[in-house]
Image (cartoon, rainbow, N blue to C red):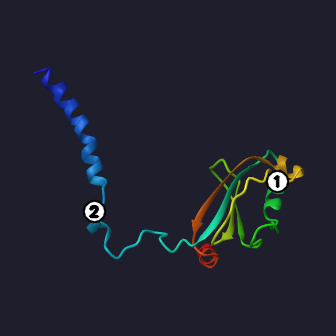
Amino acid sequence: MKSVIPILATTLLILSPGTFVQAQSSTPSAIGKGAAPAGAGKRTDVYHVHFTKAALGKAVQLGDWLKTPDRSNPMPDHFIVLRHQDGDAWDYVVITHLGPKATVEAAGTAVPPDKRDLSEWHTDTFVNGPSWEEFTRAMG
């Protein structure tokens, strides 16, 4: 009897994740035929998303520099700078609209030497998203 209980407990533990996975899976009838997932509009344009952490004591200077339009961009005024207030490692995110097509070239460091010490680290990614008009309307 003592050996049956551990075997049953082990069997239940092994089989229980399958039950949880099945309970969480969605079926087409549960989603609904006419319902679209959130944010499922047309993703026609390319955006550059830049997260950055300000160097110690340099947040204001970094923010001022990030708010300066880059005239080398195809649409220099199509960008938004957001400041993180609380709880994560990054201080700013800059979302730059590049248009319906974009080409990325390894052209070296685009940051001027006098601005390099403003940021502790950064990360860049390119994403597809809605048109600039839809994006600005959604951002308010």
Q: Is residue 32 left or right of residue 64?
A: left
Q: Quadrant of residue 120?
A: top right
Reading the image, the residue beneath label 2 is: 27
Real-space Cα separation, disc 1 to disc 2, in angstroms? 49 Å
In the structure shown, which secondary structural element does the residue marked by tag 2 occupy?
Answer: loop
Element type where label 1 sits in the image: loop
> Which of disc 2 and disc 1 is earlier in sequence?
2
Which residue: 68% across, 63% down?
Answer: 103
**In the image, residue 47 lies at what x, y percent?**
64, 65
Number of numbered discs present? 2
Q: Is residue 97 above or below residue 12?
A: below
User: Residue shown at 54%/71% (left/top)?
Assistant: 43
Q: Is residue 75 left or right of residue 49?
A: right
Among the 4 quarters of the image, the one containing residue 5: top left
Q: As shown in the figure, which amino acid type bears the numbered disc 2?
A: Thr
Q: Nearer the viewer, mark 1 or mark 2?
A: 1
Find out whether the residues at labels 1 and 2 contact each other: C-beta distance under 8 Å.
Answer: no
Q: Residue 25: which numbered mark, if any?
A: none
Q: Residues within 10 Å of mark 2 (few under 14, many from 20)?
A: few
Residue furthest out toward the right: 114
Q: Is residue 106 left or right of residue 137?
A: right
Q: Which residue is mark 1?
A: 111
Q: Residue furthest left?
A: 1
Q: Is residue 126 above or below residue 114?
A: below
Q: Residue at x 77, y 67 (%)?
A: 73
